[in-house]
Structures are given as structure tokens and as C-alpha cells.
Image (cartoon, grey):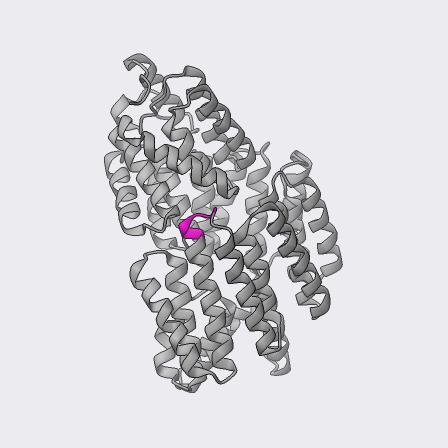
Amino acid sequence: MGGPRFGSALLLLCVATAFASDANTHKSKVASSSLPVTTSSLQAGLLFQDAMKNIEYMRLSDALDNLRSAVKKDSKFADGYIFISYLTQQPDEQLSARNRAKQLAPHVTPGERLLIRWLGGVQEDDFVPAIAAMNDLLARYPHDPRVAYLAGSWLVRQERYPQAAMILERAVALSPNYPAAINELGYAYAFSGDFPKAFDMMERYVALQPNQPNPYDSYGELLRLAGNFDAALEHYRMAIRIDPSFGSELGVADTYALMGKEEEAREEYGKAIMFAKNDGDRLTYELQSASTWIRENNRRQAEHALQDAAKHAHAVGIARLEAEAHLIAAMIEPDYKASMKQLQAAESALNERRRISKSDLDEEKARILRIRAERQANAGSVDSATDVVGRLAVMAAQSRDAQIQIAYHAAAGAVLMAQNNFAEAIPHLEEDPADPASMERLSRAYTATGAKAEAHALELRLASLNIPTVEQAVVVPTFREAMVGQSTQPPSEVDKH
């Protein structure tokens, strides 16, 4: 049995403060218009409110601290546990918090049960009922902007940008001065290629919270995505001036890396690592720093950095990032057998450490299988690669996870390209529109099938791809050099306005 809930007056207080937006609207809502929060402790409810605000400010470590304190005040606080599970990068904490939330779910309101089913389900790769729960939650609380913001934000991270934009537009319509929703809507527009709309959102975001670091950090990221590096650095440095502890050194580092200033980038990554608030962030920054050596074509130093990151991840028990370090090493390893050994090490890391969410586990396994299929196909082992694609097809059929779907289509397209089945490869590669390797293969498939206009448009988009990922580091600099050799210039920087 769960603990007693607030009485009606206290429940209404929690509704108005915890799940209403931070936009000075909806303060007079009736209880049924917002997702309720069930807790026996007023202090826990107020801490939960602070956590929601910190999530919207992108101060996720502070939000986690709020939530951990909240569940100490109320050990039967299901909402607190499910958000801990959603935010933490510590595998043990994620699992225990999710299980506790599910255990408490029968004792909270129907809306909260939908929230737990959604956020818990996506971690367990139970996507069909999880997405159904999200949709039911949106339908149950159509006038709650925070529910719409949370759903839209999750969809952005799933790379479902049109759906994300639609839901976030609803959140902004409900609460026109809701900074967090405006921020996420800017990302949805930018990742869809609509930079004018994205920059309009960022201007609104900065105007609403000029004394917070995240508006400048977000604006800097989208300016960098558009290729406007100097303006991006200016915005990141403004975020640092407002709050040196916020973490915008990472944005500066990523921007330098994309500019080709790799030594400066490593210095900034070093600062980011120094001020990181948890092992997950430190390891992520270490992997980002390793990519600078890839951009410099210094494979020996890259391998050394990746080996150190893998050891660090193993020591602190973060299997996903340990596997990621080996996966990157496999991607840059020219020797086929050595690459297969790195992929085996990545799989071993996942199999050894079981304290990992099923969604993270399955996504990482799918990525490993994708790279395995690509390397096998390139090495002429088409039959083996086809078998791996078959394994991915089974995973994709059993999961709605966007990353697993993408891994399957990317691998299938790569194997078909190795067989010169260009026409059959195209629809698969088109399902992976943002990955540099798939984009490069797709441009060749278009050319081979006579779709020269499509190939040229894709080549220009690939050459202007400014995302600080290892995939970009492996593919795009070399591709740009080839374009210059063909006297083809990438598009000019997108103007800020």
C-alpha cells in the first residue's frame, strides 16, 4: 500500500506548482487540467517542483539532487523515483529507481501511472505500450504545457522531429512564454533544417531568460549546426560568463573541434572534464576529446585516448560508455581482424555489466551489429554481413526504438551498396538521413542510379554537416577534401538571422 496522499487542498497546490509551466500562466487552473503529483510530504512536493524547474533550466545534476532529497522525504514518492530513473546516468540507480516507481504505481493516480509506464517503458525497450502511454497522457492532459514539453523533448531525442515540433507547438500555444518548450521547439526546427524558425525561437528564449546560461548555450549549439562558428563561440562564452559551472566549455570545445582547431578543443575538453559533475559526463567528454585525434588523422593517439576511456568506464561500471569506446576504436581501425576484436570487446562490456537499461543495452548492441555488418561487407564477407543484417531485422521488428530501426536500415543499405544493389540500397539509406556514413553511401547510390540532382543536394548537405560526433569526424573532413578536389564548394554559412 502507498502512503497517504495530500488532501484536496494540498493536491491542488502540488498540481499548480509542480506540473504547471514556468511561464506565469495557468496558475488558476483546476486540478483536472494538470497531471497530479502524489506525495505524503509537502517538502517532497516542493523539492519535486524545484527539480522540474531545474530540468527546464537544463541543470540536470541539480534536478537529480532535488529528486533524491524528495524521495528521502517520502520513500513512497513514485514520481520522484521515475524521474530519477529518467535522469540518472548511474546504471544501478536507474534500475532501482525504475523498479521502485513501478512498485508504487498502483497507489498513484491514473495519469501518474501513464507517466511511469511511458518513462519506464522506453528504458526497457518496451516502446509500443510506452508510446501508447505517452499518447494517452497527452490526451488526458491536453492543457498541461509541461506534459507536452516532456513529450516533445523526448521525441527530439528520438530524432522524431516533425512529431516533436507538433507537440511542442501545442505547449507554446498553451503557454506562449514557456522558455523550456520554446528551447526544445528551436531544436526540433533546427534538426528539421528550418534555421529561420529555429533562430526565432532562440531569440525568444534568450529574451525570456537573459540571466540564465542555457539560452545562450542552446543558441550557440544551433548556430554551430548552421556553420556560424564565431557567433556560436560568442554565445557559449556568454553562457560561461553567466555561470562558469554550467558546462558550456563543452560547447566551446565542440566548436573548436569542428573548426579544425583540435589542440584548442582538447584544452577546452580538459576544462569540461575537470568541472564535470558525474562519471557519465566525464566519460562523454573524454570520448569527445578522443575524436580530435581522429580529425587530425592521428590514429595512435586516438586509440590511446579511447583505451583510457574504456578503462575508466570499466572502473566506474558504465557499460554503455565502455562499449562506446571500443565501438569507436573499431570504426577507425583499418585492419579488419583488429576491428572485429574491438567489436567483440564492446559486446563483452555490455554482457559483463548487466546494470544497464534494456533500451540502452539494445541500442548499443544494434550499433555494434551495424558496424560489424559494414566492416564485413567492406571486407568482402557479404554472407556474414547479410546474417548480421538479419539479426538487426529481428531486433527492428521487435522494437519501435528509433535508434534500432536506423541501425537496421543503415546496415542493410551498406551491405546492398557493397553488392552494387544501388536501387535497393536507396530506401534503406534514406531511413538514416542524418548519419554521415549513410549520407555518403546514399549520394553514391543516387549517382549510380542517375539521380544526379538528389546526389548533389545531399553532397552539399553532407559537406556542411556540423555535428560534433565521431561519425562526422570519420567521414566529413575527408569528404570535404574530396569536394574541394572536385572544385565543389560547400554552402556558405547560414546567417544568424
Q: Is residue 370 above or below residue 80?
A: below
Q: Is residue 351 above or below residue 429?
A: above
Q: Which residue is at the front of the view, 31 or 425?
A: 425
Left or right of 4? Residue 53 is right
Task: Determine if residue 194 is in view.
Answer: no
- Tell me, yes or no, whether the highlighted magenta stretch contains residue 270: no
Query: Residue 65 appears at what percent x and percent y?
Result: 54, 29
Q: In terms of image quadrants, where is residue 141?
A: top left
Give the residue at x 54% y 67%.
343
Query: Residue 125 appears at what percent x and percent y?
Result: 36, 51
Q: Which residue is at the front of the view, 481 or 91?
A: 91
* Quadrant of the drawing holding the N terminus: top left
Specify the farthest residue to the front. Answer: 352
Give the residue at x 66% y 50%.
252
Q: Which residue is at the front of the view, 274 or 311?
A: 311
Image: magenta residue range: 355-360
Q: Which residue is at the front of the view, 90 or 189?
A: 90
* Count of labels in the image: 0
